[in-house]
Every structure is written in C-alpha cells, then in structure tokens.
Image (cartoon, grey):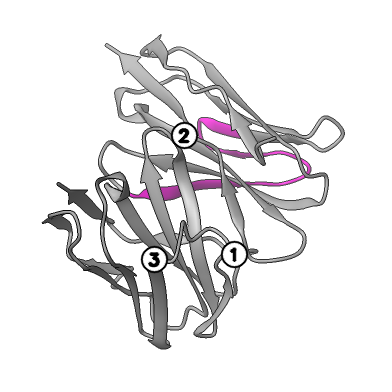
Amino acid sequence: DAGVIQSPRHEVTEMGQEVTLRCKPISGHNSLFWYRQTMMRGLELLIYFNNNVPIDDSGMPEDRFSAKMPNASFSTLKIQPSEPRDSAVYFCASSLRGGQDTQYFGPGTRLTVL
Amino acid sequence: RKEVEQDPGPFNVPEGATVAFNCTYSNSASQSFFWYRQDCRKEPKLLMSVYSSGNEDGRFTAQLNRASQYISLLIRDSKLSDSATYLCVVNRKTGNQFYFGTGTSLTVIP
C-alpha cells in the first residue's frame, strides 16, 4: 500500500523565491498534518486539516506560509517569499480520524534556502 | 513550559544493554501517548502506543504514570539496529494535535 507521498524530496532555492511543497495522504485518511523539523526546535506542527478543512493553523510561523487542501487526496504548503531561516525538513502526515489515531509520516521534503 | 520534555541524550550503550528513556508532559488533560522512532534522515514512525496499564512489545516496554505525568520506554537486550532517535508523543483529550518531544538519541555500540 502506498504511504504518504511528498514531493519534491529535496528543494534548493534562493532567498525570495516561492516554494511549494506537495503531499498526498494515505487514501481514506481524514486528517492531514504539516510539520517542520529543525535541529534547534525539533518537530513542530504547522497546520492540520480535518476533512479538508483547516482546523488549527496557529503553528504557521507567519504570513509567508500558507497551506491548502483542495481535496481529500492533495495538500500544498507554500512559502512566499522564502528566507534562509525556513531551511528545514517539512513532513506531511495523515491519520484516519485525527489526533486519537496513529499518524503516518511521509518521507519529508528537505528545503534549503540560500 | 513545553508540552512534552525529553532528555536529548545522547545515550551510548553497548549491545545487549538495557536502556530507559523518560518523558514528561505538562497538560494533565493529555489522553493518548505514543513512542515514535526516527532514523537518521528518515521520517518518524510509530514504535508503540502507551496504555494506562503499561504494555510490552518484544524487547520494548512502555509505561505511563498519570499521577506524575510521565511516560517511559525500556529497551532490553539492545541491538545495533535500535540506534535511532526516540520521540515521545502526547495528544490532548480535545483537539487533534500531537505534541512531539525533541527526541532522545540512542546509539548502540558493538
């Protein structure tokens, strides 16, 4: 069975450029989560969706970050404009019924902003 | 105060040793507890859930102490393949949010 799929796996961009990260959750899962992981801060929840609706975006760092989930099988996380401090690994995860269930993580996107 | 706190380690233990990790959580309303494992440059993966009565899965034993608000993970007979970062995860009674600890690094030495 396919797990959570993320693309691209690696992204190197220059400061000021727009970055779009993509995620396909496990089919049938109703909740989707975007995380950011850095050495300094560990794994931080940015935003999560339940049934395609954003429930809590309090973890989104600032207005430069936005996330969408137009349908149950696709989500994007966009950073515009990107800054060097955005360099991190961004994980997407999905679960069957939200926070009470196991979250399954994608392989992550390693973002480097020069 | 952080939702979840872990000793970052690193823990360096010889093969065959027993090692224990502890994790504390701040919100007494927390309801679900998990240990995740993350290998270097990989995604976190569920190792085991933690149940109120404690639970065991092979060489791994997880315990929950609600009164003191901590959970623990015990690994017996450590293998080289156990080398990884172990993340403590807590979920509140309300809401869908998981709170991850920063992880405890374990290296098992031959």
Disc 2 on helix, strand or loop? strand
Report if the CB atoms under discs 3 and 2 are less than 8 Å apart. no
> How many numbered discs sit on the rendered protein?
3
- Magenta residues? B43-61
- The residue located at (27%, 56%) in the rendering is A107
> In the image shown, does A19 or B21 lie closer to the viewer?
A19
- The residue located at (38%, 75%) in the rendering is A26
Identify the residue position indicated by label 1 in the image.
Answer: A101
Disc 3 on helix, strand or loop? strand
Quarter of the N terminus of chain A within the rendering: bottom left
Mark 3 is on which residue type? Phe
Identify the residue position indicated by label 3 in the image.
Answer: A65
Label ID, residue A20: none
Rate crowding at label 2 as few (under 14), some (14 to 19) or many (20 or more) other CA atoms within 10 Å. Answer: many
**Subunit that carries the residue with mark 1:** A
Q: Is residue A68 above or below residue B35?
A: below
Label ID, residue B86: 2
| Mark 2 to mark 1 CA distance (whole Å) | 19 Å
